[in-house]
Amino acid sequence: MPHDISLISMIAVGFALAFVLGYGASRLGLPPLVGYLLSGIVIGPHTPGFVADSHLAGQLAEIGVMLLMFGVGLHFSVSDLLAVRRIAIPGAIGQILIATAIGTGMAMMWGWSFGAGLILGLSLSVASTVVMLKALEERNAVASANGRIAVGWLIVEDLAMVLALVLIPAFAGALGGGAVGDAHGAPDRGLVVTVGVTLLEVAAFVAIALLVGPRVMPWLLRQAARTGSRELFTLATLAAALGIAFASAELFGVSFALGAFFAGVVLSESDLSHKAASNSLPLQDAFAVLFFVSVGMLFDPTVLIREPVRVLEVVGLILVGKSFVALGIVLALGYPVATGLVVSAALAQIGEFSFILAGLGITYRLLPQEGLNLILAGALISITLNPLAFVGADRACAWMRSHPRRKRWFDELGARKFAVLQKDLDASRERAAAAMAAHKTFTPEELVERFPLFAALTPEQREVLIVHFEPRSAQPGERIIRAGDKADAMYFISEGEVEICVAAKMFKLGAGDFFGEMALITGEQRSADVTALDYSRFATLSARDFRHFLHRFPDIRERIGQLAAERKEMNSATNP
């Protein structure tokens, strides 16, 4: 029987064409993002041939925005941002203000309104985190000091754009725009009241998200992981991302993007955040592709012929204006030229936030359609040329180091401040490592290395087992288990040494050994005293989880049973 296949055709053709053009862009040394945007242009209404349903594309793009923002929040690191705060915060804010002012002035010279110019300026002031991270990864520079400064700079830009997404709807009327269909909406409450209500709603949402979320969402994620079902864990992650985004929009009136961002921030505090990121990444990538395809569908390529001068001005602001502004700010703050060049190259493009802002500007009738076309043209050209910006930065550094005098000036300028920043970054790494170690039990590989009885488990089954572990530590001389106690857990020694006292006989166990399993198997009370000989760390498995795990894996149950029987026989031999 006949049925509507517009969604199927849009996804099928969009994915196929995005793959072909994305692969072609990659082969040419360009970011695949260029190919995704081009595929949208091909299936858009401004080019002949197949035309996808723009309404469906818009909804799919909204999901893509939510998942993109969820990913940004999931990788958001407060400690990394604080380590580079002295350069990233003033630098990013200063660069956004100057670039936005230039873009606004440029648009007003074209005869546009102040509101349209503001949206254009904001859209051109923010770089693409996706494109920048890809460029730094290709150069193995993400973990370098300059790379982390660039990432911190982009995080501040992202946070500023999140704030802009919140405030633009509130200021739309004052800037000469208004939401589509607002004639039937609520009466005008005045700018001050509107902004106040908006900020209160956002503050209420942020407070609930940051106070309640970290106590609830990581716990739910852990419970899903403990089931051992990959599907349930992925579903829990997506439910958190999309559910919080939808609820925030319905209950607090904030954007889907802001809700998804804070969903990621909340889950980033969980020790399962990396697993959540890896499991949700395929779907995030898929919908991100559809987002870029849908953005490309809105682009009218004839703008390159109709408005070549304006396109050049936009591209000039992105590639040259922002870069020189960033370089000047870095040098003014007293940091090295090399840092300024890396940051400048990283900012010489625009991407996903620019599209989101432009779409919001059109929704609130602030930005004309021509503005979106100019922004898209600037994105396509700047992303395509961005690798050349990094090549130029490398050559500039090489030229400055090629002459002894220039090299001395190049190395000494900003060296003191850079050394302080490097010290802060090292301290941040140490704190992150300590925090991870405090929650870490074993990796799947370490589990098998230390306990060969788990070698038969698949990597995913090992991950499930590790999720059931709870960390515990003991000071030297601390009694961990007392004879006669009720059996509550099995202990796996990850660090340190303990002394076992059974029937007046003592022996020691060290890292890689385990104890406490016999009472769990027999159901009897503890038969031994266990004391820490030095500072020790354990991964414990509760009695309930122990029984559940042995029920699921009979082979391991048999092996542990054999070891328990051997220990029981040994203990009996010491006390005939």
Image (tube, rainbow, N blue to C red):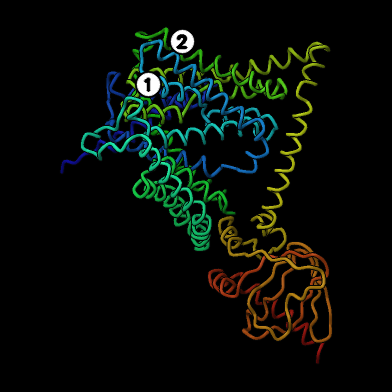
In which quadrant of the rendered image does the C terminus lie? Answer: bottom right
Query: Which of the labelled discs sits on residue 85, or is there none?
Result: none
| Kind of element beneath mark 1 | helix
Q: Element type at marker 2?
A: helix
State the image coordinates of residue 16 (x, y, percent, origin top left). 38, 31
Identify which residue, 309 or 552, lies in the foreground: 309
Whether residue 137 can be seen here: no
In front: label 2 or label 1: 1
Q: Residues within 10 Å of mark 2 (few under 14, many from 20)?
A: some
Name the residue beneath numbered marker 2: 312
Which residue reaches farthest bottom?
576
| Residue linked to disc 1 | 116
Q: Give the residue displayed 33% in from the left and 20% down from the top.
A: 368
When the figure is inspected, residue 495 is found, relative to residue 342, above or below; the finding is below
Q: Residue reaching furthest left?
A: 1
Which one is nearer the viewer's eye here, 457 or 270?
270
Alpha carbon distance from label 2 to label 1: 18 Å
